[in-house]
Each structure stands twice: as structure tokens, then as C-alpha cells.
Image (tube, rainbow, N blue to C red):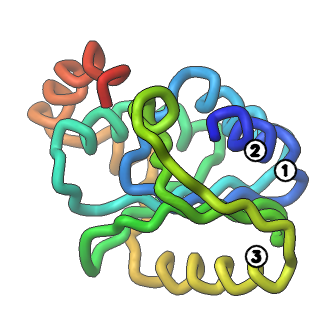
Amino acid sequence: MYTMFLLAMASAKHSIHITNPYFVPDEKMITTLIGSAQRGVRVVLLVPGAIDHNLVRQASRSEFGRLLKKGIQIYEYRPALLHAKTMVIDGIWSTVGSTNLDHRSFALNEELNVVLYDTDIARRLGAVFEQDLANSRQVTYEQWRRRSLASRFLELLAIPLREQM
């Protein structure tokens, strides 16, 4: 799954739309997303506003500043817990499954995704993604930069645990 996700992101020409509850990517995935954004690809991440594991949330948010500064849009879903794991690339390639964008999913857990190369399905997933964005709050770099001291402290505590998440 890891290699497939990286190849899909690296080959994107227009858009990458990711919905993922446990977004704790490694350095290679971060640089791939940033590289795509720098090539002019619209990269949009949808993550939960509330999560069942606060330390995972803090580990995820620790990288937001870097991503936001490079033009990646990040939204936090507000109405309920977010558990969907989808990705749509360029409105034609999509995946749905159990894989989170974290070390555990790629290296430890037995995850399963289906990959579809179909514009109709990608369009339907894209419509759901847009509906979810309408129920989300966009995270700006300024908001992220003004996060609390407690959040910053928890982010620091989460750094050595990133590979366990």
C-alpha cells in the first residue's frame, strides 16, 4: 500500500484528495505530497477535528505547518468522528480501504484497499469529499502557528512515538 500511495501521489497532475483519520506520514510521504503541491497539483487533506487518540492527533498536527506553508490545504471534519480512508487522484484513480497514512498501517497491520481506475467512481468519491469539506473547518497556517503551548508540548512528546503510531 505504501508504494502504491507514493506512486499515485507522485504521478498526480491536477489533484490529490485524501481523507484519513490517522494522518501521521513519514518523511518520504511528506516530501512526495510537498513535491506534488510544488508541481502545481492541488493537494487537499481531510482529517478529523476530533479523534479517539489525542496523541495521534498531536503527532499529525505537528507537521501541518510545513505542509500548509507549501500550499497543501488541510481541513478538519467537524460533525462527527471521521473514519473514512479514501484518496482520489486527478478525478480518475481512487482507493478506498482500511489503510491509514501511518507507520502501523504500512508496516504492522494487515490492511486492505481496493484501487479503482474509473472516472465515474472517482467522481462519486470526489462528490462525497466535497460534501465533507463543506462540513469541515479549513486549517490556516496562522491558526496552526497560534496553537496552544499545551498542543506544542504534546506534539514534542509524540515525536519519538511517530513510528509506533
Q: Secondary structure at mark 2?
A: helix
Q: Which residue is mark 2?
A: 9
Percent x, y of residue 77: 36, 70
Circle number at residue 122: 3
Tell me the kind of residue under disc 3. Answer: Ala
Q: Which residue is mark 1?
A: 12
Percent x, y of residue 51: 22, 56
Q: Secondary structure at mark 3?
A: helix
Which quadrant: the C terminus?
A: top left
Percent x, y of residue 25: 49, 33
Tell me the kind of residue under disc 2. Answer: Met
Residue 155 is left or right of residue 65, and the answer is left
Marks 3 and 2, how far apart at CA: 15 Å
Q: Earlier in the sequence, mark 3 or mark 2?
A: 2
Can residue 29 be seen by looking at this rendering?
Answer: yes
Residue 10 is left or right of residue 18, and the answer is right
Q: Secondary structure at mark 1?
A: loop
At label 3, counting other C-alpha atoms closer than 10 Å, the crowd grade (few under 14, some 14-19, many 20 or more) is many
